[in-house]
Amino acid sequence: MLDFTDWKPNIFQTLREQIESVSFSASESGLKDLNHNLQENKVWFINLLDIPPQNLTHKQQLEQQCSAIINQKDHKLSRSFVIEALSISDFLKTDEFFAATLLHHGTRQRAKFNRPSAETAILLFLKERGDLLACLSSLIGSAYNPDTKLPVRNLFSKYIDSVFSIIPSKDGSFARKILSTIQKLKTEIIELDGRSKQLMRQPQTLISAEQNLLLQQDYTLVNFNIDIISVRIKQSKVHQRYLAHNLWLISYNYLLDTVDIIELTTILRNTEIDDVVCPYLIVSLLSALDTSPEHISADIPAKNMHEKLIRNKDFINNFTNIIDKERWKIEAARATIMIQWCPFILDAIHKSPTLEAQLIVKEEHLGEMFQRAVAKDAFQFILHYLLSFQNTEMESMCIEIMPSATSLCETLSPEDVEFPPPGMVPETFIIISEDFELYIRKQLELFVISIVTKMGNNLQRIRRQEEDAIQSADAESLSRSTIKKSAVVRHDTETFFFLIANIYRNHPDEGFRFWMDLKEQIIDWGSSVYEKGMRRGYLEMLCSLATGPYCSGYADEFLSRSSEQNKVWCSWRTLIGTIDIYTRDENDEKQIVKDEAMLLISFIRVFRQVIQYSIQARLRFLQDNVLRLLFRLLCRNVHTELKAELLYAIASFCMPDYADHVYITRQIWNLLEDAQIVPTVPKDIVFDSANVWEVSNMQAQDPPSIKKEIEETESREKLFFVTLAFVRFISELIYIPHFNASLRCGFPVRSMSIDDDLGVGYRQPGIAPYINFILDDIFIKALARDYKFPTQQWNIISASLEVIEKCLISFDLTGPLFYDDQSTHPSESTPFVQRSISKDELILFNNNAIKYLKNHPGFDIMKRLLNNSPLVDVMFNILNQDVESLDEVDEVNRKSFAPFVKESILRCLRIFWLAFEKQERFLNKLIPLISQASPGYLENLENAFLSKQDIIVQIALLLNCENAEICLYAVKILYALARSSLFNPIGVENRLAAILDSDPSSEAILDVFVMRLDINSGDDIWDKKYRFEDFELTRLGLQAWAIPGDEEFSAMPSIEDTEITFGTVRCAILDLILENLRPDKTPPTISHFLLGYDLRGSLQKSIIKYINQDSLRESCLHKILEILGQPIHDDTEIDKQNPVLSEFPALAACCYQIIYRLCRDNHTSEPTMLFLRSQGFVQKQFTSMPLYIIQPSQPIAWDSGTITNYNKGPISIDLINLCANINQRTWLMKILALELRKCQTLSGIEQLLALILGASIIKPQEGATDEEVLAPSAIKTREILHMLELDWNDPWKIDAPENFLSMINQKACLALNERGNKRYRLRDIFSELNQAFDHSRIAQDGSLRKKIMHILRYCYYLNRNEEFNLSRYEGFKAWREVIEVIIIDHYTRLRLHVRETTFLEILSTLLTTLQREGNAIAIVLSKVILAAITAIRSDRMRLHTSRSQSRVASRNLSPIFSQILECLFVPGIPPEVRNNLYATIYNYLHYIDVQSAIGAGKLLKGVGDRLLDIIFEDASNGHVVGKLCALNALTAIYRLLKQDKGNLIIKHIKSNFLGSIITSLTSQNDLLLQAKEQQPELNAMHAIYVFEARMGLLLCLAQRYDLSLELLKKGIIEYLGELTFLNERPSFNSHNTDSYGKPVYKLYHDLLMMVIRLITCILATVGYDEKVLNKVSNFICGHQGLIAEIFTDIPPFDYLNFQNSEKRAIFIMTVEVLQEITRLFYILGDKIKDIDKVRRESHQSTYQEFLKELISRFFPARKRLSSMIDDENSRIQYIQQRVENINENLLGWCQKMTFPYKKNQVDFDPIFTASLDAAKRPDDDYHGDMKHPELSILVNYLRDSIENLDKSLQNLDKLTSQLDKGEDAALSFKIEGFSSISGDLVGLNDSQRKALAYRTVQEDHNTASKRVSRCLYDVEVSLPLLWRHLDYYLNPKRTPVSQEYLRKNAPVVLKDILTRLENLEKQPKIKEILEQFGARDNYFQESVRKLNALLDPKL
């Protein structure tokens, strides 16, 4: 039993689409799925449109419990919901639960319909019923359609049979159920119509008490208004037509039984003529009574059923009574059925002779019955009613004035038979669906054939009677008798001929059977008629039967053969002779008799039809010079209708289906010029003059015949046959090859049928006068004239617009004349293929081209369009037509003018679009070239639109039209306006968006755009051929040059006839939105308006409208998300197999790109991303995205190549689909990268990371072992990378033509498209090649053709290849963005022990991929490689992990390094990739552990010279970045191999590189000097970077002894001494900065540091060498001013407490420099004395004095720094480290200056003075003499060093103890110290935590050990230094005062120091540690003893 509460919308729409898809493909899986769905929905088909009645129980449950069963679930409902559900129940008279179900879905989808929930529910209900009936029609119609594939046909027929077989007994049969449903709907319509009229009469109705109570409770009452009632009435009528259509299908395919036929007849008998189902029922009954059902001859059951029916005497008698005796509401309908009944009875009698006796009608009565039926206007009824859609307005007018249309004939005696009184056939407009028209014609064809074959004698009798009556009437008229006429003249034979004519009119070769089987019965028989009306009807029939290539040949043969018999009137001889007679009449004013004219019109129509389709006949008549004869008749004073037919006949000779059609067309132009129908000859012309006649020279002559007829005759009669014919005639003369393709792809077209030389010599050549006549005298006046037929007005307008359109299309503004790099002088524009022509020929060539364009009618049309002429105003008025009302009129009356209005609107749109496309070149190129022209005031077309803004709104509303092409060009116009700077000015409000948003129709505009984006509208989802412009252009170009039959391209497939669907419109809308989301657009734009962003507020705080669940509206953003499977107002989950992503990748790519641009734009980013985040958009989309490209279900065969994907077989796919597949993943990954950057929640980030890298890398799986954790994870982003690794086998691939670059203008023909890639402008290339081809003297040479074709095809291939490469490049870039965001922002969120292995896997994959890719993609991949290795290295350093304890085995790292080296050896690898690889090598070598380093060293040795040659080349001659990266890589490699004695790199450096790098140090000295200036030039900055890199390498080299010697040998010290920029030290007060804002003194500081450090390193490596020391001394002497300035410019330590970061930075820089300088002087030792000697002689401060002052500053500073408190402890620690290094250097220098010391040495030069006062107060600041440091400074320093040593020893002992206890103790010891890496500890198991803790303790132990070593050094050096000074001062040779002072104070000051020193070695553990650090045994105790002995000689 059918459960109506399980009702859901769109079920049958989906089923309908599936039926259409399977019918096309007939795939086995598709048939299986379809059968399953059909079986599931069978019960709905059986039920048809029945709905459950109202149910009191359900109503009570709704009212009392507020609950209902909806979709098989119990729902609790609100009170307002209940009220609405009950209202729906009352409105539909259906079950309350069913109404609640409808309302439930209406609530969820109300935004789509922009209506309240209840109304939406009604609309969904009505729509689903229509879809159900449409499905039924498809099933029944396809089940017996021979064009349907056999498996599909079998499935459908079995299914339909099963549906028919299980119809409930109460319904009888399915046909009767249809009939009863039609009647129910009729009753509903009557009731609804009455209700609607009542509402119109009483709009304000009283409300009940219950409703009043609800209103008081704030509930909204549901009162269905007239609008929704009208919609329901309209839809019910549509459903009636669907049902009646299905009834005919059943009757035609399955036949009806007797009960069905009687029921159908009964209903038809009582049907009004204006009933929508009336024609359907008539045709169904005709089908049921068909006596020759040929279509069922092979169907045995149907054939048996027909046999049974035709032998049923009871049925025959009963039906005879119904049709013969009972009254019918439509008597003409009964007459039609009666005619069909006569052959039926005749056939029954012939098949069963014994049956006649049992029938109430005999065979002899059938003739009388037939004639009576004909006399009741049966033929007229069929002609005017059933075939009304076939009539033309001229024929309608002519038939109205025929006597047969106003009276009935009575040719038999009244005594013999009773005839009805004469009457009119009522004029009725009927609604017949377009697809049913074919079935009507098919049924009427059987009807007519049955009459001809079985009732031919009766037709003959009727014809004789009519001829006798007409002859008698004519005789009475001649005798002028007053006797009453004995008979009324009828014209049924003529009408029968017209009936046949209308059945076959404009349907080529469908009347073929009449020539083959029925020629004698009807064609030969009809040719013997002599009455004019019959002859005219016969000729009209012959005209229709001559339609088509085959039929026209038979007609031509028939008329030619008949011409041999002089007495036969129907022949070509008769026609030509008659015309000749009329043209020879000397009386020009005499007109042809009206009847003869009408007969001649019909005959000329036959002539036109034969000429149009038969090339042989056309050529024969041309040879007979018939054209001139027709023109002569055209110039006579003949009837306007005849003149119109003559124009049509002449135009038929211009058919472009034969080789000479251009020649014939030009001949017709000349005949037209000679005829002067339009005045073109100036009135005052003087021939043989030198005058050049312009349009302005034209003088008005006497009004020509055509103008006179228009203004006087046709305007008076309001019938414009000649006007329309002339416009269409001119249109035919302008032949545009490939019209549709030219519009789509911009193919450069020139109409060869336009005679450029027409009128040459006496006027401006060309056809402009004729076009101007059409524009000025016809088109512009067309809207103002009165018309008898509105269709004629719009036909004229449409035809005129077609002429304009053709002129603009053929107005070709491409080629060399319009290149951007060409001068405006015509002689400099030259074709680039044929350069062999002379200069004079070239000038002539270009002048001719300019002259051609100037004389072309398109030139004048463009001027009219660009100066806002009346032409533009008229076109704007046309665009102002209400399209929505036209659609309604068109639906009601197929004969209305609405289609022509739509066609006119379409042509206006296309004309404007063409003007937009051409105006730039026209204004900027052509107008300046035509210097002699005075075009007047011309401006861009946008100005006209801006002045009439209502037109823009109207164009936007045109999307409501049901014509897809109108919608498409409306979008294109908006696209053109949006691109205009006038509507989209930079930095100013967007005018286009403002116009649309501020208009009262703004919501309606938004609604129509939303409607066109809806993929559930039943139309094509996407036009897969939308972006095939280049293909079409190339195909057309190749065909244009191909030699027929010899070239492969002459038969290439064509897509010219591709229909524009709403899928195409959807493409254009998305392009419009994308274009106006570009960054260069000033927001808000039209895109923001369409997407629902609030334009009235600030977009900085933009709001997305209509996204709430309660919103009643939708925006385009809703539809974009629906396309991607995430509807905003639907809570269903996204389909994981979203077909859009796989079947329509281009659509998905556009949607993703729109969303990305919204997310990227700062104006819309925040609200968009918040909204998408709330929808889970990124996660759901990334989950549903297919990993690999899927082969399309319907590949485009003529453009398909093959791709071979990673580990996948070949896939057949076209380029557009391939690029779209890549692009959709590209934009989704870009969105993903943005979300990763901006997502604020940890859970959201982790979800995204889990999608990208797999859940195992984000959080541990329960119960996972350590091995499982370390295993490789399933990384989806790696699969996407593999998807991008594909090879494309392009079917268009072709080798480059020889000398290709010299054949075309590369600069002019290459242009950047919207994506930024270079593409050849194929239009210009084609034009250039075509002009060269036309101009060539050897144009017919086949080799030239092939050469030109080769060039065009190769350019197209390059465009395709560029598109493919760009798509992949952008895909790799997007992939890189995702990975880099993870690396930079979220690397630490990944699990600690998995992330390293994961990214090493990715690294290995990337390195493999890089070797196969081109340069651009290799650059992208190399950046990812660098980012990954940098992150891995930084992570290792951050975690302080020892290299020897890496979780990655060295055997796994070596292949990676090997791949890096292999990438460097790839031929042609670009410098950018090498630079990134150098940086990768640098990071890798700093990352690997010891074992891996050994493997890397082996690999480096293996590559040998190859690698070093590459690196040396880049380091020496590369770009700045290349030099830096190469030098850094070289540095890292050297460090790795520096201990290797047979180091190959050292040999290369010595032999090839070292000398050049040293000599280059001074080459950029001038640039380094410039670097100190404000905002130094880029070259200066580059010089700094390169200098730093070179110095870095030299520093590494200087650490090796042999290389240090080599450096000295090469003169490194001397070169450094020549660096004059060192002496230009910037002041700390200087505000100069570089381009990055870095102070120049910081730049200088870095360079100085490196120079001093290099010298120090060389000295330290070489050791004491007098020559080296002398060189260094010379360097110091050369820069002594600099060094002295550094010593004197030391900021105070208070700078560290300043909040000013700049001052703190200055102090840090000073300390860094002092560290290096003090180390230099420490190494120099007493060599400094020689330098000071020179300085002393020049009265300068000595360096020793500077160093002593430093001791006074920095020895006390150590303790002071340790007491400082700062937020940035790391900064203080850094300064402390630098100060300690300075003190260490100073301490060492002191040691050297006082060593060797000998007791009683007299010349000892003490450093410290003999003062100990400050040592008594160690906690106070030092205030002594800074230039002469006191001994107390050393004592305090020693005291502090001993204290630090003690603390360091205690800490080291503690750490040693923890290491001895193992990992458990280490974990408990370090558990609080893991706060810095707490995020990395998530997911670690116990063993991993213990291991990490133990390694951390090891690191701390190493640090503590270094600290002990430093402290120990300070103590060990300070003690002897102190002893030396005390020993010196206590020497008796010194003054006694100092001795007494020291002997008194020294013991006091040193007591605590000596005690602590003595106790240190007494502690066993401490002593053991000291011994480990190499401290001498009992060193401290010995030192204490010596000091004590010195202080107290008694000891």
Image: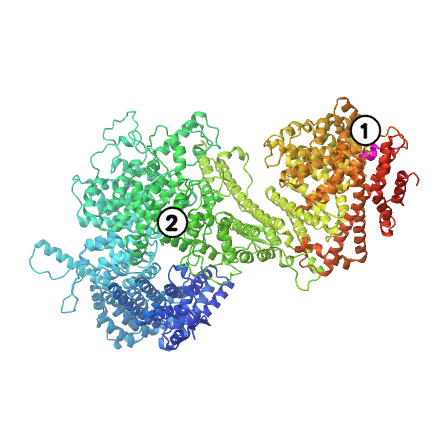
Q: Which mark is residue 1727?
A: 1
The vertical placement of 1617 against 865, above or below, is: above
Q: In which quadrant of the rendered image does the C terminus lie?
A: top right
* Image-quadrant location for residue 215: bottom left
Q: In which quadrant of the rendered image does the N terminus lie?
A: bottom left
Residue 626 pos. (x, y %): 27, 42
Q: Amino acid at mark 2?
A: Asp
Q: Label 1's element?
A: helix
**Residue 1250 or 744: which is nearer the viewer?**
1250
Label 2: how many Cα within 10 Å (few below 14, some 14–19, many 20+): many
Q: Which mark is residue 997?
A: 2
Residue 1297 pos. (x, y %): 54, 37
The residue stretch that appears in magenta: 1789-1797
Could you tell me how far apart the alpha carbons at marks 2 and 1 are, in whole angstroms?
86 Å
First of labels 2, 1 by sequence position: 2
Disc 2 or disc 1, which is closer to the eye? 1
